[in-house]
Structure formats: structure tokens, C-alpha cells
Image (spheres, rainbow, N blue to C red):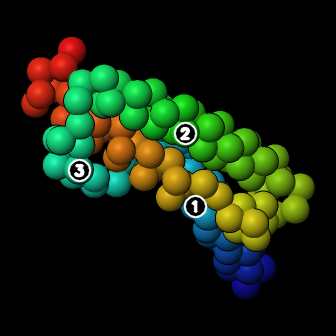
Amino acid sequence: MNNIYIALKSFSLMFLSLCLIASCASRPSAIKASFVSDEVYMDYSCLQLSSELSEANESLQKFSKLQESKANTDAATVLFAVVPASSLTGDYAKEVSTWKGIVQAINSAQNKLKCK
């Protein structure tokens, strides 16, 4: 009977740990881009596209750094508080996904317009 209790307790702790790890903030590299149509950018000049791409990359970098920080904080807090901080405060995954999609759309428009 005691062995069953120990096995059940171990399984429960392992299951809880996996649930907590799964709720941690994702690394920016693991976040997929949202779909953004390149049609939005097809009327832009190559110069405008270059400027838009520069701004989009800056925003992507900004939110990727913020998301990386959330992921690092989660890794640390889960060890001490057992609850990932981002589950309480949120993260920047949506913004990273959106900006990745925008960058892809601008790149696609540049390729179709033969800007590079």
C-alpha cells in the first residue's frame, strides 16, 4: 500500500511539474509568425518597403527581448514560486507573432516587386 502511495505521489508531482513548465512563456524563436498578407504592401515603393521593414524589425527585436525576459523570469520563478510569473502578468507572444508576420509580408512584397 505504501509503494502505491509513493508512486502516486511521484506521478502527481511529475504531472504538476509538466503542467507548470508548459505554462511558461515561450522563447521568441519558438513563436510562429501570424499570417499577414503581402497585399497590404504591394502599392508601396521599394524605398517605403525598406523603411517599413526597418521599423518592423526594430519592433520585432523589442518585443522579442521582452518575451525572452519573460521566459527567463519564468524559468527562475518556477523554481522558487512554483508558478511561472507570466501566468500572472502575461507575456509578449502575440506581439512577437504579429511582428514576425509583418516582417515576412514585407519581405514577400519586396521579393514580388523585385526590390532587392
Please tell me which residue lies in front, 27 or 75. Answer: 27
Instruction: Give amino acid for label 3.
Output: Val
N-term mark: 3 or 2: 3
Give the quadrant of the C terminus.
Answer: top left
N-term mark: 1 or 2: 1
Query: Please, is residue 78 above or below residue 9 in the view?
Result: above
* Mark 3 vs mark 2: in front: 3
Q: How many marks?
A: 3
Please tell me which residue lies in front, 95 or 88. Answer: 95
Q: Decide if residue 32 is in sight here.
A: no
Tag 2: Cα neighbours inside 10 Å, few (<14), some, or many (≥20)?
some
Please tell me which residue lies in front, 78 or 55. Answer: 55
Q: Position of residue 3 (x, y in %)?
A: 72, 74
* Residue located beneath label 3 in the image: 40
| Numbered circle sitting on residue 22 | 1
Side of 44 where 97 appears, left or right: right
Tag 1: Cα neighbours inside 10 Å, few (<14), some, or many (≥20)?
few
Which residue in the rendered view is the most extreme toward the right?
Answer: 80
* Residue located beneath label 2 in the image: 59
